[in-house]
Every structure is written in structure tokens, then in C-alpha cells.
Amino acid sequence: MAVRKALVCIGDSIFRGQPPVITWFRIVALFAVSAAVARELVVNGNAHLLPVVVTTFTELVDRYLAVWIYRQGGWVIIIIIIIIIIINNNNNKAKQKTKNSIQNMATVIVIIIGLR
């Protein structure tokens, strides 16, 4: 499937390296790309392909991120980091964007946990 192949190629590129280069910023990049692909599928009338995005995202998390995230303190730590950014940021527009990002990440995490 083209959607799966594209996401795998992008994920491989994001974490390219030996060993794979993993940072929270790269993880957020994977979220952003996956969300953008999902949005485009819906906008273009291909919502039936959304499970491919979720499944591929989950595979990439398992392949590259699961152990690293666990060693960093789990998914909760990224939410704490984002909350600290919100607290330290006085720009209301940026706060709303960050809040929306937290909600989107939380939704994807809940979906992934539900698939397991």
C-alpha cells in the first residue's frame, strides 16, 4: 500500500542513523507527519485508509521508539515537558497551538494503547 510505504520511508528517514537517532523532537515530527497524512486522507475522501496510518505509526513506534521512550520515563515525560513550555510561554497563540498538540498526541497515544 502506498500510504504504508510512504510512512515507513519517512519514519526511516526521521530516525536514520546507526544506532537510530531518537529525540523527542523527532518523535513529534513522526506525530506531525502521521497526522498530516491522516488529515489529507480524510480531506481527499480516503478516510477508509486511516487504519493504515495508525497501524504503520504503531509499527514505527515499536521499531524505533518503544525502548527509548521507556528509558526516558515513558509517554508522560513528553507531556510534562510540553506543560513546562506552556507555563514558560506567555504567547496565547503559542499556548493554544501547544494545547492542541498535546490533545492530538494524547489521542494518538490512546488509539495506540487501544490497539494493543
Image: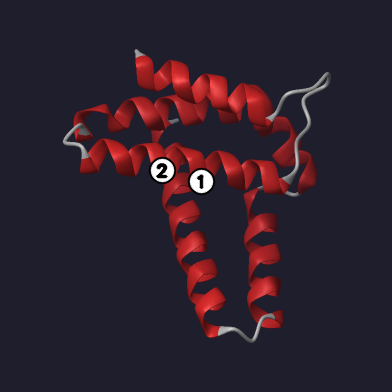
Residue 42: image location, x then y, percent: 23, 41
Give whichever of 49, 72 is nearer the camera.
49
Q: CA distance from mark 1 to mark 2?
A: 6 Å
Q: Residue lying farthest top?
A: 1
Q: In the depicted view, which residue is nearer to us: 31 or 2? A: 2
- Residue at the image point whose x is 56% and y is 75% from the top: 94
Residue 18 position, x and y percent, is: 83, 18
Which residue is disc 1 drawn over? 32
Q: Residue at x 41, y 52 (%)?
A: 107
* Residue that lies at the very extreme toward the left in this rendered image: 45
**Residue occupying image coordinates x 46% and y 21%:** 6
Asked if 55 appears above or below 82 in the picture, the reply is above
- Residue with the mark numbered 2: 36
Secondary structure category for the residue under label 1: helix
Determine whether 90 is above or below 95 in the image.
below
Q: Is residue 64 left or right of residue 100?
A: right
Residue drawn at point x = 50 percent, y = 52 percent = 105
**Type of amino acid under label 1:** Ala
Give the quarter of the image for residue 103.
bottom left
- Report the side of 10 relative to 80 (left or right): left
State which quadrant residue 70 falls in.
top right
Q: Secondary structure at mark 2?
A: helix
Q: Are marks 1 and 2 in contact (CB under 8 Å)?
A: yes
Dividing the picture into quadrants, the one containing residue 90 is: bottom right
How does the figure colour the protein chain or chains? secondary structure
The mark found on residue 22 in the picture is: none
Q: Amino acid at mark 2?
A: Ala
Of the 4 image quadrants, the one containing the C terminus is top left
Report x, y in % for residue 26. 67, 41
Above or below for 8 versus 110: above
